[in-house]
Amino acid sequence: MTLVVAYKSKEEVYICGDTRLRLLDREGRSVDALNGSLKVIILSESLCFAYAGNITHKFADSLPYLCNSFAGKGIESVLSALLDIHILYNGRIDFIVSALSPTAELIKIQDLKIIRNLTSAWIGDIDAFNVYQESRLGDKNHTINDSICMRSKLYIYKVPDHPEADQELFLSMCRAMESVVGNERVESVGDFYTAVSSSNKGFYYLSYASVDAPCQPPHIGCRTIGFGSAQEGGCSLTALTPSSPGSAAVAFHYFQGQLGILFLPKVSYFPLVFAETNCCDFIDHVKSRYGVCLDGPRFG
């Protein structure tokens, strides 16, 4: 089912969504994180859409063609096409659409109709959305429990830095979505999350990184914090995004596993996997094969 949440603040639009796919493969097996999908898709500098619902193989197979068919299309053409898809699947796949021209607009396609002029919208699993709301609007002074104290954790977020950006809103969205993705009780949402912001240059994805390492013993003076090996339970993840607005691509790299995962919906519904590669080589491979220039935090 997944979860996608969007807000419009003045003329700014922010959208967050996870990548988990509740879909059986053609042999009837559940897919894993390597078979998720990018749910928030930038079509151009001024147009972006997201989807959630009961995804079928037919929809998955058609998505790359759909994304490419939207090239050069305006908001009304895209809305009409997505409404047809929504109706075709009997309302089981919902959409959020945002356009920046002529003015910023947030739109939802749900319940067999187009709902316009929104300041906020969500689609997907209602239980996941409740957890999201509790995290974003709840008590900010969380008590740190003993299990967390036994780990060394670091989170790095890139936030919109143009003058009109609502950084507090954007950061609260990312942290709340991250809490849902990491909540094992919410089975329909998980794996990774992606975040999109608008700017005067257009829609773009924002990178982030996380480090979850074994607890480091106290030390007097300066000391480099070790990431820890996979055998020690270390997990360091970086989200890489295109260096320019308007491009539909997001990648993730695991430092310990030397594994790169590229979401490129105009080429493939499912992610493209690069094994046994460090972060810098992964970035080079993506550029040479697909012409996408990725940027973001790099480990190793």
Image (spheres, grey):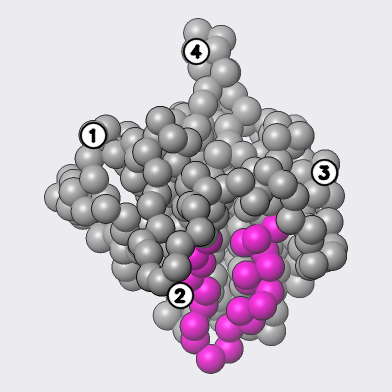
Residue 231 point in image, percent of width and height:
40, 30
Residue for badge 3: 126
Judged from the image, the secondary structure of the residue bearing numbered disc 1 is loop
Among the two numbered marks 4 and 2 on one chain, the one whose residue lies closer to the N terminus: 4
Q: Is residue 39 visible?
A: no
Q: Nearer the viewer, residue 221 or 255?
A: 221
Q: Are marks 2 and 3 in contact (CB under 8 Å)?
A: no
- Which residues make up the magenta segment? 155-176
Residue for badge 4: 26
Q: Is residue 95 left or right of residue 30?
A: right
* Label 4, label 3: how far apart the Cα atoms are: 28 Å
The quarter in which the N terminus is drawn is: top right
Is the residue marked by circle 3 packed among few (<14), some (14-19), or many (20+) residues within 10 Å?
few
- Type of residue at label 2? Gly
Looking at this rendering, what residue extends furthest in the front direction?
Answer: 220
Residue 64 point in image, percent of width and height:
41, 40
